[in-house]
Image: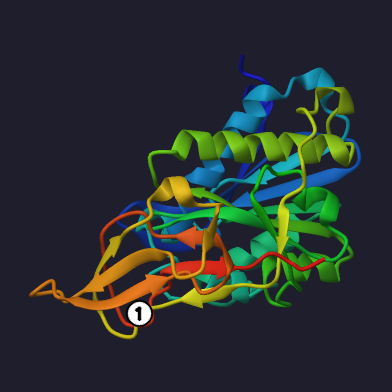
Amino acid sequence: MAGIFEGMRWRGYPIGVTSAFGTSELLLGEFGGGEPGLLITAGLHGDEGPWGGWAIRKLLERIETADVRGFIRVAPMANPLAMQVDKRNAPVDQLDMNRVFPGNPAGSYSERVAHVLATEALKGIDYVIDLHGGGSWCVNDFVFEMEGGRELSISFPASFVVKREADSDSLSGYAQSLGLSVAAVELGGRSQFEETGAEKIAEGLLRALCKVGVVDESKAPPPIDPPLPVSGTSVLRPDSGGIFVPVLDASHIGTLAPKDTLLGRLLHPATFAPLEEFRAPFDQTALLLLRPFVAQLEAGAMTYVVSQPVND
């Protein structure tokens, strides 16, 4: 079943930067023509790579032409150069693209891409879902709930939801300044559960599209319980560089760990002598992000993102 994928209208926006991979361009795809309109972006950070784009493809294959009521626009590879080198930021300017909105048509690479997203991708849009989840070095299992975007956020089968204000210079923040409803999704990443993660994102996307009337509501996946609310986030980082060895693997993402649970260790890069331990800091430590594989870390590298359930 090809769904609406074969009928997508694709348009490329050259960014004017040539790399070893050729001339970079931002691709936007669109289907439908009614109202409302919803934009899905993935890969604003290049090391979050193909997982969001994979989920978008799965989504487009599930929706039939007759089911579309509004229009869908997608940017499956929103930061082409960064994704090509599997880095968070593009190597030509090292800017965090999600902190330069609304961009600058005469600026650096990241600023020019942000400008295209802010002008062309958001044109005529009512809702925005920004897929970030996981990456080449981590797995995630949470969503951000921003003001006015709860129905979008709780559409996803995530374990946890974090209420937060969008940064004004992010895609979400800029979209909110235009009066749009937004959600930022942090699901998936590199592990043995990649296929499952992409399926969960695609399921959440379809449920959200049905909730807001872009797709016929009869096509919605079954209802789900909303994610568990947690209070903010804390990042665990090493004090020094070394070799990180996880204790908890990817199967533990999205779970609650008792206080002092050993999460992972940092070892000396030459002798492999123990340097540091990462332990659960709360009575009920919500595991929002973890590194599931052995890795070389520099001092201060993000290693875990944790939180704790909101008290009623």
Identify the colour scheme used.
Answer: rainbow
- Left or right, 120 with reference to 271: right
Most foreground residue, 25 or 265: 265
- Which residue shows up at 79% across the image and 41% down it? 208
- Which residue shows up at 76% across the image and 28% down it? 221
- Can you say which quadrant of the picture contains the C terminus? bottom right
Q: Pinpoint residue 103: horizontal percent, then vertical percent.
A: 65, 73
Q: Secondary structure at mark 1?
A: loop
Q: Amino acid at mark 1?
A: Pro
Q: Pinpoint residue 87: horizontal percent, then vertical percent.
A: 39, 63
The residue most toward the left is 271
- Can you say which quadrant of the picture contains the N terminus? top right
Q: Is residue 95 visible?
A: no
| Up-down relation of residue 167 to residue 67 (above or below) | below
Please identify the quarter of the rendering in which residue 35 is found: top right
- Left or right, 212 with reference to 186: right
Task: Residue under label 1, please give it.
Answer: 238
| Up-down relation of residue 40 to residue 260 (above or below) | above
